[in-house]
Image (cartoon, rainbow, N blue to C red):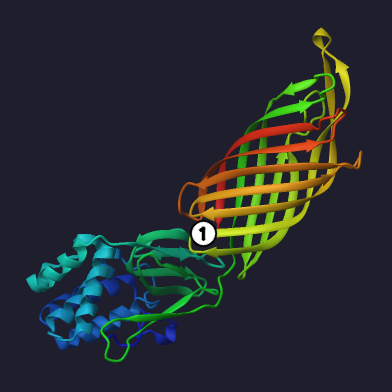
Amino acid sequence: MLAGSIWAGAAQASECPQRITPDAFRSRVEAVREPVAFADPEARKEVDVLVRMLEGCVNGPIRREDIAALFLARGAIEILSGAPTEWHIKLARDHLTWAYVVGSRDAWEPIYGPQVEEIFDEVSGHLLTKGVLDLSFRQAPEALVVDGDLVQGGRRWVTAGAHVVQWKDSDGWHGELVKLAAEETRVIGGGRASRERSLLPSGGAKESTYRIKWGPQPTGYLGASGRFGVDFDRVGHETGALQGGHLFPELRLDGHLLIYRWLSLRLNVVGGLGVDGARPPTERNAGLSLGVGQKKDDVRWDVTVGPEYKSVPRAISQLRGENDNLRPVFQTDAAVAGGLRAQVQLSELQLDAHVSVVPLPVSGDLGLGFDTGARYRLGENALSPVVGASMGRFSRPGASIEPDVYRWFVVEGGVQWSY
């Protein structure tokens, strides 16, 4: 058995056997190999102490090779000491698997001999499944390290098994030894995360687990995109005036916050060219909405409702153009609308739908808007590029029997920061 639970959260300084530097840790890992190979009883104690040190007792990033070497030694000592129980065999196989997860086949040390190598080759020969480390911090750490590699926060696909996560903040270095099951998502970084503890049932050879749910910490994103689109408009039907479109640029800012359990908050701002004249002005709106939502692993959904500021085009007159064709002249009406938004996110793909009802300030009639789109995040880092496309429609009573209709199709590209 390990000395104490190695699955606890980040160790406090008082719980550490001692605090050492990464170089000192490496020296002790290298020094324990030969005693482990000869099944020295004192080697088990040293290995257990070093495993405990993985949880916040090393003042700096631990090298990937040293983590893998320690897991390999922990598995080897269980085999070479001749422990007969099924539990000890499973413990050995688990640690040899983790050594391969962290260090690949390069983790192997010939000093441990053919008996350990046979089991190491067996466990590493299987196709290892994946899990997700969700590295979410309320305040970004100064440095973040996974298995010896400097990384950024956010969701990371990693091989199922044991991983060492370290981070540095104003209080110094912290660490957590994370045992990740296949297809499991673990949230690391403090706050109200799911916490897991392993139990050994009496007389049993298998591990069981339970989780205490404290509720997810707030998650969401902020995004900024440049957009380029085309309008297809139908206005002034009694004269056959305008049936065509034009190209236009836009800028979109949007954000989302999913707060404790179900409360969802969404912000959306779109700015385009608002010049009045012979062509309809492009879209300009801003909205803040509140609603309900849920997030589970890589699936998130929410539905929100709230007020929106919108600028909507209005054809106010018609001017005689070339060949005696009549053309409308457009002005912009500012209106406060009611909007309903729905969004579903499946891993990196985000799908949106939006409906707005607009009381028109001049005529008192109602305009109706609808748009839908999709965006895809290119990467798993907290700050990643996004691409997308959307289309929409807005109609308002016009000067003819049929309403004026404005349609558009937009492509976009930008960046998104997820937290």
Q: Residue furthest top?
A: 323
- Residue located at (45% from left, 53% from top): 380
Task: Report the front residue among 150 and 134.
Answer: 134
Q: Is residue 277 above or below residue 266?
A: above
User: Going by the image, does 396 lie left or right of 106?
Assistant: right
The residue that label 1 is drawn on is 299
- Residue located at (30% from left, 64% from top): 64
Mark 1: secondary structure: strand
- Residue located at (41% from left, 69% from top): 166
Q: Is residue 88 visible?
A: yes
Q: Quadrant of residue 306?
A: bottom right
Q: Is residue 9 visible?
A: no
Q: Quadrant of residue 86?
A: bottom left
- Residue located at (62% from left, 63% from top): 293
- Residue type (three-letter) at the residue carrying disc 1: Val
Task: Report the front residue among 227 and 20.
Answer: 227
Q: Quadrant of residue 183?
A: bottom left
Quarter the N terminus occupies: bottom left
Residue 36: image x %, image y %?
Answer: 15, 79
